[in-house]
Amino acid sequence: MDSAIALAGNPNSGKTTLFNALTGARQHVGNYPGVTVEKKAGTYVGNGNRFNIVDLPGTYSLTAYSLEEVVARDYLVNEKPDMVVDIVDASSLERNLYLTVQFMEMGVSVCIALNMMDVAKTRGIEIDVDKLSELLDLPVVPTVARSGKGKKELMATVGKKLKDPDTGPFRISYGDDIDNALDTIEEKIRNNNFLTDTYQARWTALKYLEKDSQVLELGQKTDPSLSKEIEQIAQSVSDHLSETLDTYPEAMIADYRYGYIKAILKQGVVRHAQDRNRLQTSDRIDKVVTNRFLGPIIMIAVLMGLYHFTFSYSEMLVGWFEGFFEWLGGFADAHLPEGLLKSLVVSGIIDGVGGVLGFVPLIMFMFFGISILEDSGYLARVAYMLDRVFRFFGLHGSSVMAFIVSGGIAGGCAVPGVMATRTLRSPKERLATLLTVPFMNCGAKLPVFALLVAAFFADNEATIMVVITLIAWLGALLTAKLLRTTIIKGESTPFVMELPPYRLPTFKGLFIHTWERTWQYIKKAGTVILGISIILWAMMTFPGLPEKETKLFEQKREALRASAASTAVEELEAADDNPELSSAAAELKSRLSAVDSGEAEAALRSSIAGRIGTSLERITRLAGFDWRTNIALVGGFAAKEVVVSTLGTAYSLGEVDPEDTASLSEKLAKAPGWSPLTAMSLIIFTIFYAPCFVTVACISKEAGSWKWGAFSIIFNTALAFGLSVAVFRIGSLLVN
Amino acid sequence: MSKMNMRQMAVDQAGTISSVKADGELGRRIRDMGLVPGTEIKIQGRAPLNDPVSLRIMGFTLTLRNREADFIEVEVK
């Protein structure tokens, strides 16, 4: 049977690099049950061994506070892997061993991969590997994950230890008070077989003293009276410690763990050839990169660079994707018989799938860029520099990345933005970021703004665009603050964060990272989005015009043909797409297409979406929107630029290209019921209302529940409507 | 030798942690990163807006907010 190996270790210890080196392409990504933490699994084959390897989330500890820690712990407890390979950063041995000690406390079989031996060496740290192994009584194998050095030896050692898995009881002293309490509790647990199926007795006892919420909860459910008894013992130790030493049991336990590690390291395991706190290259870079004046300037340049990289360099690929789907649409258009099936295939399926896949190059480039920033260690510096600002709004320094990518500099996209929140480790801040990034002005909202600004604010285009960007930022940050003081209330997650040394990212790591995340997007979002785009298509198509009205338009066309000169009719019928037409034929053609557009308008109005738009008119009048705008906004749920093309249809202009909106601008500027105020109201609404459904699907996936997707639709639309009404009403008062 | 709150420490000032008066999640997170009594630290720098603070501890760089540094008392040299 294959053995199951879990890779564990601190973040930035090179765990993922080692995982990639061991499993290569033989890996797959999923989620741990019920949570959004990524679970990566793969296989290693070598030396006649075959191991199934799971890459546990990187953690500093095994408490039950962060999601990653709970996931790692649950995996060890429930899946009982045959061995834990603990990746320990040799250049930061003391802190890394803290996690190792906790594995030993749990009683799992551990093998240490002493990684980054090269880095340790350049820092003048010498480690006596044999001595460390002897003192810890664990196998220790030096590795350099980046180059794959030591991975064979590591796996061979794991294979050897698997055949002879002696895990003698591991006991360290936590001081007399706690040790005595531990003994008492352990005995009670053993006598009652309390939770012993799941945990080792001494470990449960230790967790009771640490007031571990997860274990306490399970204990209270399993045997309330015994649990209470143990809690009382723990409480009396706690009281005693607080009286005599002014400390807490969990603090005591941590102190003794570190004490144990320090004692081991002092026995000649580590020798520092230089002062351990002397400035490393990394620190010298930081002196410049996080400098009070230079830091923010460099940061702005880097973020602009990322933005530019994501959106400019992906342009060509995006163009190819679009071109391909246009070609496919054209192909279907030419080869399918006229009718509903064709409309479904072209407008529903191909446009829908094209819409999803159209984001793929963007997402790939963005994740590639972010992976560089993340793997190099710069992202942590960004969080460090901006935390003070974002914290004020209940967010985290790391939130900035998601905001920028979503369109913090106008023209991003909320889909990769929502996915960029994965770099945030604090759940509340992450959720608040997820829910507010769609307010940024993504590239698809820009055509809407361009249309309205050109029609009503042509003299101040640049100013208005800047104002629109500022409104979006302000709205997003204030909403985040609102959410964090109401439904996502709670203390901000502590910022205690490591600034990892700068490292050159490896290409292998970058590509694996990028590909995984992109593939997940295609797989997860793809299916849902296809379904919704078909529904939206149906809403804007059915029930279609009643036969009587279709006939009426047909009669109009007939009448036009009859009244025109017969030569003109013949010329038009014989003509291909774009030949030179005589003036009579051209005249007839434009009149005919006016009738077609009129029919399209009528059909749209009588569709489900049209009926919704019309019936909502009474309410939306408050914000200055008529039924045409309403339908356009419903269409905007598919993708924001659809607002423009739908407005075009609703104003009988036929197809309007979102890239070229001059004719529609003119029409709107003259249309009754439109004023600069209406335009402003619609701009505000467009910034804030429901994200497009691709974004909603991503929000739901990332937040782990459709509830949050639904929330973003309802809350954002309500907010947008409130703001638009306010703008329109207050504006009306001022104008009159 | 005098005791001082970590928030008050100047850049490049070094010392030994004498107590960490935080419990619950914050306390645990602080201790997990090695901020326990007896550990030597050195203030490395402050973010452009003076908060968070970054410090050198056990050979790596750690950042925390001032309001978290408030719980840590350091015996400075």
Image: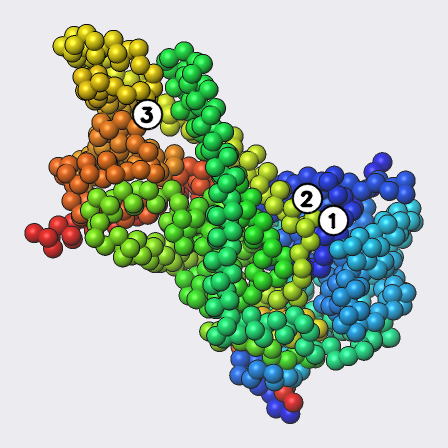
The type of residue carrying mark 1 is Phe
- Please determine if labels 2 and 1 lie on a single subunit: yes
* Disc 2 to disc 1, C-alpha distance: 9 Å
Residue underneath mark 2: A40
Graded by Cα atoms within 10 Å as few (under 14), some (14 to 19) or many (20 or more), the crowding at tag 2 reads: some
Left or right of A352 in this view: A450 = left
- Which x, y percent locates residue A166? 89, 53
Residue drawn at x 87%, y 75% as measured from the top left: A268
**Subunit bearing disc 2:** A
Residue drawn at x 91%, y 46% as measured from the top left: A163
The type of residue carrying mark 3 is Met
Using the image, determine if residue A341 lies above or below residue A252: above
The type of residue carrying mark 2 is Lys
- Is the C-beta separation of discs 2 and 1 under 8 Å? yes
- Please determine if labels 3 and 1 lie on a single subunit: yes
Residue drawn at x 44%, y 41% as measured from the top left: A695
- Which x, y percent locates residue A704? 52, 43
Left or right of A670 in this view: A75 = right
Earlier along the polypeptide chain: callout 3 or callout 1? 1
- Which x, y percent locates residue A356? 48, 34
* Disc 3 to disc 1, C-alpha distance: 49 Å
Residue drawn at x 56%, y 60% as measured from the top left: A379
Residue underneath mark 1: A19
